[in-house]
Image (cartoon, rainbow, N blue to C red):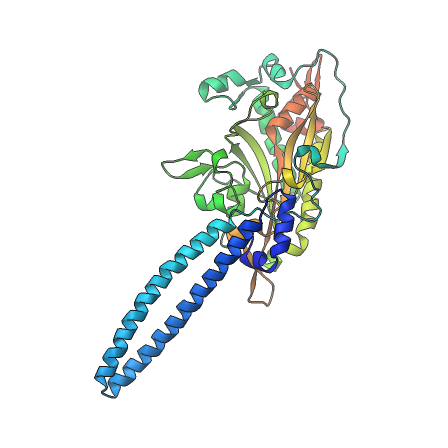
Amino acid sequence: MLTIKQIEENRDYVVERLAVKHFQAAQLVDQIIGQSVARRQCITRTEAIQAELNQNARSIGQLLKEGRKEEAEAAKQTTAALKAQLTSLSSELDALEMQLKHLVVQLPNLPHQSVPQGRAAADNVEVRSGGQLPVLDGTALPHWELAQRYDIIDFELGVKITGAGFPVYKGQGARLQRALIAFFLDEAVRAGYTEYMPPILVNEDSGFGTGQLPDKEGQMYHATADNFYLIPTAEVPVTNMYRDVILRSSDFPVRMTAYTPCFRREAGSYGKDVRGLNRLHQFDKVELVCLEHPDRSYATLDAMVEHVESLLVKLQLPYRILRLCGGDMSFTSALTYDFEVYSAAQNMWLEVSSVSNFESFQANRLKLRYREEGEKQTRLAHTLNGSALALPRIVAALLENNQGPEGIRIPEALRPYTGFDTIQ
């Protein structure tokens, strides 16, 4: 969430930067500024009446002390009228603050200056790529057929139990899932991240804190009886561990990692891009979350990108890194890098990670602040996160790219975790 100060002091800049995200902000920004002015005027009137009440209280005591009862009674009547005004102003201020918050949360985060112009994925900019594209013969199968051939993933059983988008992993498929989770977590811990195991249901405050609510409410599964939400990513509970927290500048960086199942309704998804593991309603993911000093958050973003890249190198998967254009960025992000791996049998690139810097946008919602050594004033921290990694499309690419006449080869980095070299 942008701060009122940001909006009021940089009105034209806010409008200009949000245009990069193709968000027409001028009218909304002006409404926010007008509402903020009205709020300050209400506060000024409230403070003036409170000061008058305090003065009256003192004068009533003095009048009574001097025996001037009639004047004291008149002053009491004035006090009653002032208290009624104060009650009315308090209600007015509550309404103004509620409306101001309603307006401000509609504004996306400002994109970083390095964000490319563009409207959609086709306008994203490739930063770099790595790995060799595999060459498969004409008998190569897509992963959903490989899963059936080797009896490692049962899509139909998932439909029977729950519905489409909830596959059942079995045998070597289940062990591959477990191996990838352990591998990703171990790599994160080696890189200095502290491992957590958070809840997978969160309350509204947590959803608001990281920006899923109200922006993505329709994409989240909602447990209505308790008003809890199933998490779309571990980013939500992990980042919210620091909601309403004041850190010291020496506490940075705070590095956290967590494995969780993730749940996304993905309403409206259809077509070839959702076949097999390409788009699921429930999937496993290891997430990285960093809290950082504003002066160092972009260096940390670069380090997170390098970490995710190292995972793909170790898995021997061909990949490319994209800097997202304004039109393809999320509501909350200031700068995002997407990672895609090549799926050989489908002849397409599959997104497997997004690594983003949110600057102070989430921190303002979370009330996550820090204090410099020796200072009383608090400032907003920066938050970052990234997938390291989401499993379904990694599994799809591993199965397709490594298939051969003797089975599916497991990359060397994973073999200590799987306990087997080949899926047969």
At x 58%, y 50%, the residue is 26
Across and down, in percent, residue 67 comes to 22, 87
- Quadrant location of the C terminus in the rendered image: top right
Q: Report the side of 6 relative to 159 (left or right).
A: right
Across and down, in percent, residue 303 comes to 70, 45
Q: Nearer the viewer, residue 292 or 185?
A: 292
Dividing the picture into quadrants, the one containing residue 24 is top right
Across and down, in percent, residue 194 comes to 59, 45
Given the current orientation, which residue lies at the most extreme front position? 27
Q: Is residue 419 above or below residue 374?
A: above
Residue 175 visible (yes or no): yes
Residue 313 visible (yes or no): no
**How many circles with numbers are drawn on the protein?**
0
At x 22%, y 83%, the residue is 69
Dividing the picture into quadrants, the one containing residue 118 is top right
Q: Nearer the viewer, residue 296 or 111?
A: 111
